Every structure is written in C-alpha cells, then in structure tokens.
Image (cartoon, rainbow, N blue to C red):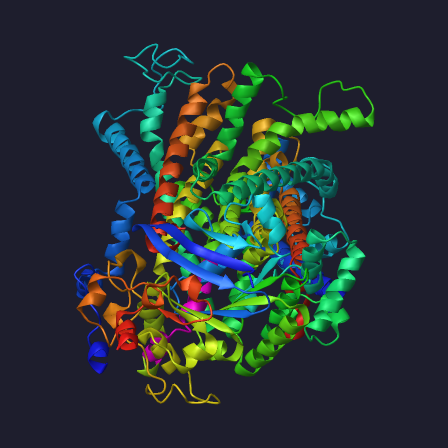
Amino acid sequence: MDPLLSVRDLKVEFDTRHGRVTALAGISLDVMPGETLGIVGESGCGKSITALAMMGLIPNPPGHLTDGQIVFEGEDITRASPRRMRQLRGRDISMIFQEPMTSLNPVFTAGDQIAEAIMLHQDVSKKEAWEEAVELLRVVGIPEPRRRAASYPHEMSGGMRQRVMIAMAISCRPKVLIADEPTTALDVTVQAQIFDLMRDIQEKFGVAIVMITHDMGAIAEMADRVAVMYAGRVIEQGRADDILDDPRHPYTSGLIGCIPALGREAASAERLPPLAEIPGVVPPLHLLGAGCAFADRCPLVHDRCRRERPPLAPHGMAAQEFLGGHAVACHAAEREIAA
Amino acid sequence: MGASGYILRRLGYGVILLLGVVVLNFLLIHAAPGDPAEVIAGEMGGATQEMMDKIRADYGLDKPLIVQLGLYLGGVVTGDLGESYFFNQPVIELIGARIVPTILLVVAAQMIAITLGVGMGVLAARRPQGAWSAFVSVFSTIGYAAPVFWTGLMLIILFASMLPLFPVEGMESARFSGGPILYALDVLHHLFLPALTLGIIFLAQYARLSRASMIDVLGADYVRTARAKGLSERKVTFKHALRNAVLPIMTVAGIQFGNLISGALLVETVFNWPGMGRLAFDSVLRRDYPTLLGVLFFAALMVVVANLLTDLGYRLADPRIRTGGSRK
Amino acid sequence: MTDVATNPPQTAAAPAPAASGPAVEAVSPLRESLGIFLKNRPALVGTAILAIILLALLYGTFFVTADPYEIVWAPMTPPFEEPDYALLGTDYLGRDILAGLLTGGWPTLAVGAAAALLTVGIGILVGALSGFFGGWVDDLLMRVTEFFQVLPALLFAMVLVTLFSPSLATIAIAIGVVSWPQTARLTRAEFLRIRELEYVAAARSIGAKNSRIIFRVVLPNALPPLIVSATLTVGVAILFEAGLSFLGLGDPNTMSWGLMIGQNRGYLLEAWWPVTLPGLAIFLTVFAISLIGDGLNDAFNPKLRSR
C-alpha cells in the first residue's frame, strides 16, 4: 500500500537572534491511509513544526523549508502554489490544536466558524453549510447541536470547544487529520472522551490521523505506529506495540518510564523504574554538535556517541524500507542488537 | 441582564454624572475670585455700587449660593440654561447655533483618524519588520508630537498659497447660492482641512495602537485556525484578525472623545470654524457665567453620549461582553 | 542516572549557563534596563535633541541674555536677511525670533515638568489608594476620576487658568488638575495586579503597615510603567501649555513658544517664520520626549521589543 502522505528528508530552519537554527534536520515519515501515526517528543523537539510543515503553515519569516519533500497523494506540496495549498488545507489535510480555549475565534459563533470552512471548500449555500455545521456538531457528540451552533466559544467548556474544532476539521472529510496535542489542555476524563471521539471519527470517515503529543500514554491509547523525535530528528520509529513493549532508544525508554503505569500492562515498566524522569532538557538547537543530540542526557553514552551521529536505520538499511519494522538511531541499541 | 436593562442603567448613570459635573462647575466658578457684576457693569460704562446691585438683583446673584445652585439645576432639568450676560440671548440658543459645527468637526476628525489610522496600523502589522511598519512608527510619533494648532497653521500655509485646493477659513463660502446638496458639499469642502488637522494627532495614536493590537492578534491561535481552514490571507487578516484587533481601538476611541473636543477648541480658532470654541473662549474671558456653564455642560454631555455609544458599539462587537453577564 | 541528574550536562560549546548564573543576579533590573535604553538609537536621538534644546535655552538666557521683547529690526524681516541683528528674522513687531526661541522655551518646559509632576503625584496617590484598598475607597475615587474625565481637559484647564488669573503656577496646577485621571487609572491597574502577588502577602504576614506596603513594596514594583507614563505626560503637558499660550491664556508676562505662534498667526501668510519656527521648537521638544518615553518602555519591557 502506498503512503497517503510521506515526508522525505524534510529540513526546516528558523532565523533567530542566534542566527539560523535548524528546527528539523531532515526527517522522514509516512502516513498510511486510515492509520494513526503518533509523533512523540518533548517540547522543542520539532514535532509541532513537522505538523505545521504538513499544513504548509510554517511562518515565513522567520521559518524556511530548506530541503526535502512532503508528498501528498503523489504531489509534492512543498512546491505547491499558495493557492493550491489553501485548497488542500482544511479540505484534504486539516488540523486541530492544543488550546481549544484560544483556537476558536471569540467573536464568531461555533456554527459560523464551521460553516465558513464548509463554504470555502464546497459549493453550497450559506443555509446548507449551516445545516451541515449543525449535523457535524451532532456527529462530534455535542448535545442540542442546533442551539450550540449559535453559541459563542466563551459559552462552551474546553472539551466542547475541542469537539467544535474537530467538527470544523472533519467538515470537508479530510484524508489526513493532524492533531497537535489535542487533549493536553483538557481534564483527564475529557481527554478520554476526545480520544474516543477521534477513534469514532476515524472509523466513520477513514481519515488518517497524525497525532502529535509529548505523552506516551496518549500514544498507547491512540497510535498504530510511532515516530519518536528528539532535537529535530526522528530517533526511533516503528509499530506502536513494538516501541511501547520494547523501546530501543534510551530516550524512548525514558519517555515510557514517564507514563504512570496505571491501566497499562506493565511489560516495559519492569525494565525501568516507574515515573523515572529523563534528566536535563533538550539542548538549544543552535548548540548542537556533530554527535548524538541526546548524548549529554544519556545513561548509556560512550565516546562514539559524542563523535558520530547514529543514523536512523537498522543495520544500514534505509528507514523507509523498513516501514513495518523498528528503526532506531542509537549506537548503543545497535550494539545491543548486534550482540 | 438584557441589553435594554443595560442601556437604561448606563443612561441613568450618565445623567447622574452630568448633574454632578454641573454642580462641580457651578461651585468652582463661584468660588473663583472676581465678581461678574463688576465685570458687566464695567462693560456698561462704569461700575457704580447702584448699578452693580441692580445687576446682581437682575441675574439673581444676590441670593445665597445654594439657592442659586438650586435654581440653576432646576433650569438645567427643564432645558433652561439661563441667559448670557453679554449676548442678551438664552444660552441654549447661543450653544444651539454653534454645537452642530463642533460635532461635525469632531466626528469627521474621528472618522478620518480611525479609518486611516487603523488602515495604516493593519498594513504595518502584516510585516512588522518592514519599511512601511517603520514609517508608521515614525509617523505616529511625529503626528503625536506636533501641536495641533501648529499643524493647522502649517496646512494653511500649504493650502492657502501653494496648493489652493481647500478653503482655509470658515465653514461656508461667502454669498453661497445653490441647493442643499451643493451647500453640503461646500461645507464638506471647508471641513476637510480642520478635520484633517484634528484627525492627524489621533490618527497617529490609532495607527500605533492598531499596529500593536493587530500584531498581537495575528499571533493568536484562532488566526492559525483560520489559516488551517484554508482561508486566504486577506480573509484571515480582515475578517478573523481585524474583528478582534479593533476591540481595544474602540475602547481608546471612546476615551479620546474628550481630547477630540479639547483639540477642536484649538482647531476652531485656527480655521475660524464657527463652533463652540470661540464661545467658550469669550465666555471665560468675560466671566459670562451662564454661557460658560452652558458650554461646559454641553461639552460634558457630548463626552457622556460618545462614551455611551462606544459602550453600546463594544457590546455589539464583542460577544463576550454581551452575554458575559449571565455567566458570571 | 542520579549522577547525571545532579550534574547538568555542560559542554565546551555552552559556557553560557555557567557564566549566567551569578552574573544575572549581579545585574539589577534597573541597570539592565539602562543598558537596553542606551542601545536604543531613537531614544538616544531623543535624549540628544532634548539636551541640545536645553543647552540652547541656557545659552540664550545666560550668555547672550537675549531679550525677546526688544524690537531689533523692521517687522517681518525674513530669516538670514539681517544676520547681524535678527538671524532667524523678526516677528510682526520687529522682535527677534531667535531671541524668542532661545528664551521662550522656559515657561513651556517649566510648566510641562511641573504639571507632569503634579499629574503623576495626584494620579499615583489616587490610583494607589484606589487599587490598594479597593472596596468603597476604590468606588469613591473612581467616581471622582470619572467626573474629571467627563470634562474636556483643555476646556477645563482654560476655565481654571482664567478664573484664577493666569501665571506659570496656575497654568501648571490647572494642567495637573485636569490630567491626572489617566495616571490614576494606570496606577490603580498596576496596584490591583501587584497587591495579589506573593511578596505583598509576605510583607503583610510580617505585620508591615499599609503605608509601608504601599510605598516600599508595591509602588517600587509598579514604577516601570509609571515612569514611562510620567515621561509621556511631560510631553502632553508641554502641548497643553503651548495650546493655552497660543490662545492667549498663558502667563501674559512671559514670552513663550506658544504665545509667539498665537501673536503672529494673523500675519501667517505674509511671514511664515514667526509661526513655523516656534512650532518646530515645540514639536522637537515633544518628539524628543516621546522617543525617550518609547525607549524607556522598550527598556522596561524587553519582551515586547523583540516582536
């Protein structure tokens, strides 16, 4: 099966006061039709930039997409005209954001904001668009959708606003839905409801979901496949079950250690102390040297890690050839596997 | 709380505020040194004791202050602001003949300032580091620092001799003959320079404010959402961002009304605009208390009405205010 | 693992964290702001303009002891025509414009500074009491503030100045009396914000008196926006004084830039310089002060600046 959306060697740089800084240092990802790809990492690792790049929304200036491709249904959208990109945005690829409290425009009603997206991409009357918006609100599980369509965002709870965002995002039956930390700002109980809703939507419309998160729990909950990012690179990639049960990169192990073991089979928790924290922080991107970016925080670090950056490929193979498999960019893991 | 309840409450508050201002002005003016009877008698040709007593009796100046205040307040409530000491005309007529040009000037200046100012600010915000943005910043500092009467005089030099496109004096052409439409155009023609002069200071402030506000709003999450929908940058800017960016500008525009009237006093002097400025000036110099109190009352009235309209406009523009009351 | 946790990673490429630790604490916020201000080119230009204006006024008053009332040449002599007698020309009476420029700034600047001081003084007092105590004090003071905001300031000042006979002092007081509400509102907002912060609660818990909390704890932290506002208030007060003088309501015994414009405006179309030059002086003064105010604002809010 061909991927629906594939990112190849994508490089994004930002102009900052420290000069030009690399935010994405050549990442490659594939999104298959109807699947959920989780992209996980700490803040500053480049996962949100990846999402914005897929939407063609890297702010320029200061951002520059300097290399690589993003191929959607055979078309390299990094070369698409702004006009073509606007057609794709919201219609074929849509996105929901982390902050439902601030992601809806406070001066327009929920219905208006959904209907606006519908009218933009479909040839329908204002009335039809409004009816469709009401129907979408019903689909995303909002009670009294007709009344709620006429409500303003400030009259709704955070969970309800995120449902409105989802309704807006699926209004044109997109093929890819990018969800950037969709539940981070919400209560735990509401989080579970939103995940349920996203699974329902996926089942109903067959949409592929790219789920951006810092939370391995959310990955465990939602993802079919996972890409772990660190300092602008994918450092481990594979099927969600494989990675959760058998993380090979010490960073991934650390992230999994950060999941409260509640409700999860503690298969991996045996190997690491529960709730272990990864010491240190993601290094500033302009200070990255030639070695592995994780070296300074890594419990398994050795000399080679500081000299030479490990490639993301099992035993010299290209990562994308290894789609179903489990790729990791770590010298230590490679040694372990080789041994 | 419903909208009508809100309006009623605001109206009631405005009335109380105005009455308070009337009392304050009245007491202030009567606390000032100087005897109006003496001034009036002096103008009539010699301040004899006899004459001054008669004048005091005529204008009720011999009564205790509190009685005078009571009589005055009673008059204000019934629309009687007394009679001018000098023009021998009811104050309300004097003001009635001059308030329309002042309102015309103030409103025109405000409209020029808001449309041009917001336009400049929005364009600047689209490229905050660009040349246009730098120009707007410099221009707004210059426009703010130039004394309004001086700007007016400079425009007169420019337009009186070098570029005679607009009349530099008065509100209508001498010996004007023509229908009402032509008359209106003639007035607008005369209005242009005074309104522009007065508008420039405020234009500068609105440009700076809307640039900042727009930069703020363009970075908001909901603007990113609008882009993610696939909206064009024009729609994102002018529909989604601008609607939010104008909210702080509306607040400031309401506050500025008092300052606009202050500026109008100077601009009217510069352009011989037949508004309340001259009347205010004359009545204060001549201690024409009834006229002065009337001018102050109407100035305050204009500010109160403008603030009320601003509040109502804000309620229409921001749904969070409109329905916020029921949730909190 | 614990070993790594207690020793944060430090590479040779990143000496910054080690150096910034004690260094950051040594630089006080005020010093830091001063540093930012000194790197702000427009603010330095403003400071330079203002310094030149002040030096020119000092020079005119004490070295050449110019007399702005003396008739030196024929009325309305254009600039540079009689450089020995009236370098910048004469006004409608034949008085030297340069002499007026070199001396007429004092009333403007003095009234501007005094009025700004008064404005800020009243404003801070009212705003501080209102914001700190809240409740009925706040209600009462805010109602009073509204009364003062309903009357157009220049009209009100005009009335005050005329009724209490114009002099530099009455003008300064009048401007102060009509201008304080904005400062009061700003101070109140700052106090409302700061009084909720932890160090105020801490001061309360050790039994500090209200006056001490207001002036020693809250006020110093509210100062940055107030300093910026006070600077800009000087500019506004100067424009105010100029307007009153222009109308002929200034101190009749003192030559000032505004008065020069007002007296010469009837001859505007015959002689542009007696009107244009004093106006330019007022404009440059206020412009310089605005640049300084903006510079201070940027210095106190470096975050806003980077946008």
User: In percent of the image, x 53 and y 55: which residue is there?
Assistant: A55
Could you tell me which residue is drawn at 38 percent across and 61 percent down? A318
The percent position of residue A53, horizontal first and vertical second, equals: 48, 55
Look at the picture and state if C137 lies above or below C207. Answer: above
Front one among B179 and A54: A54
Q: Which residues are magenta?
A: C184-204
* Front residue (pair C263, C305): C305
Residue C254 appears in the picture as rendered:
no
Q: Position of residue C278 (x, y in %)?
A: 40, 27
Is residue C56 in view? yes
Residue A95 sits in quarter: bottom right
User: Which residue occupies the extreme right position in the image?
Assistant: B179
Disc tally is 0
Of residue C101 and residue A212, the one placed in the foreground of this image is A212
Looking at the image, which residue is at 73% across and 40% down? B96
Mostly what secondary structure, the magenta segment?
helix
